Amino acid sequence: MQQLVFIIVYCICFMSACQITISGGKDSLDVVKGYERLESKVDTLIAKLDRSLQIPNVKDLKKHHSVIKNVALKKRTQQSSWYAKTRTLLNNICCATDYANDGNPNTFSHTDYENLPYWWVDLGHVYDIKRIEIINRIQGSNGDRLHDVDITVGRSLKEMSLCAHYKGPGKTGEHLVFRCNRQMSGRYVKVTIKGKEYLQLGEVMVFAPEISE
């Protein structure tokens, strides 16, 4: 800090072309006044420097560095159809739509065998999507049913854009991680099979910066 003060003093003196002389009478008084003005300028510059170097507090850091979390967990969902229209199949692990985002990868959603089966989640707010993760159905040997999948993101279900495509086929219990081909924001995330198939999802997770309510 002493070196910094010296540099500041030097700069002020240089810019002001100040001269320090030792003499008596009026000249001595001028030197004292010059010192006082110089000291005032130095104090002002040091105060400005301290403010510019001030470390932000924890609240400020939280505003700019939000926690990334799964914002799809237990949010409102819907699928194109509901296989067997039951929650109790296979010892209560199939087949309701909310089984795909209940936080338990052992349960899974399940549609009928149909053309373009889909599942979507309403995140409740518009988020900056960082990544989307899908856990394929864990039980059984039908993991290969997950193929030719479009993952879309949008602010409404009428304005969805492609985030990523998965050719597949998947494997039972496989954990897939997708990052959108560009920065995307949205309230809805939709998973669709482009063809005729069952859509079975063990868990769909959407990771984004948390929004303060």
Image (spheres, helix red, strand yellow):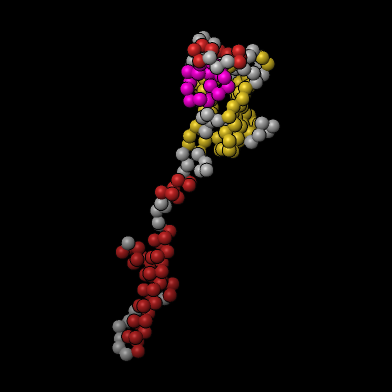
Q: Is residue 15 above or below residue 134?
A: below
Where is residue 37 drawn, in percent x and y? Answer: 39, 77
Q: Nearer the viewer, residue 198 or 43?
A: 198
Q: Residue at x 55, y 17 (%)?
A: 87
Asked whether residue 24 is drawn in magenta, I would say no
Residue 199: give x, y in percent of width and height: 60, 17
> Which quadrant of the figure has residue 45?
bottom left
Q: Find out whether residue 107 is within the magenta segment.
A: yes
Residue at 61% from the left image edge and 21% from the top image edge? 149
**Side of 142 where 81 appears, left or right:** right
Question: Residue drawn at (61%, 15%), measured in percent from left and top?
Answer: 85
Q: Quadrant of residue 44?
A: bottom left
Q: Residue furthest toward the right?
A: 158
Q: Is residue 44 positioned above or below 202 on the image?
A: below
Toward the viewer: 110 or 48?
A: 110
Residue at the image point whose x is 46% and y is 39% from the top: 67
Q: Nearer the viewer, residue 156 or 150?
A: 156
Range of the magenta residues?
Answer: 93-109
Q: Say whether residue 184 is visible.
A: no
Q: Is residue 2 visible?
A: yes
**Along the line of sight, which residue is nearer the eye, 180 or 133?**
133
> Picture quarter containing residue 10?
bottom left
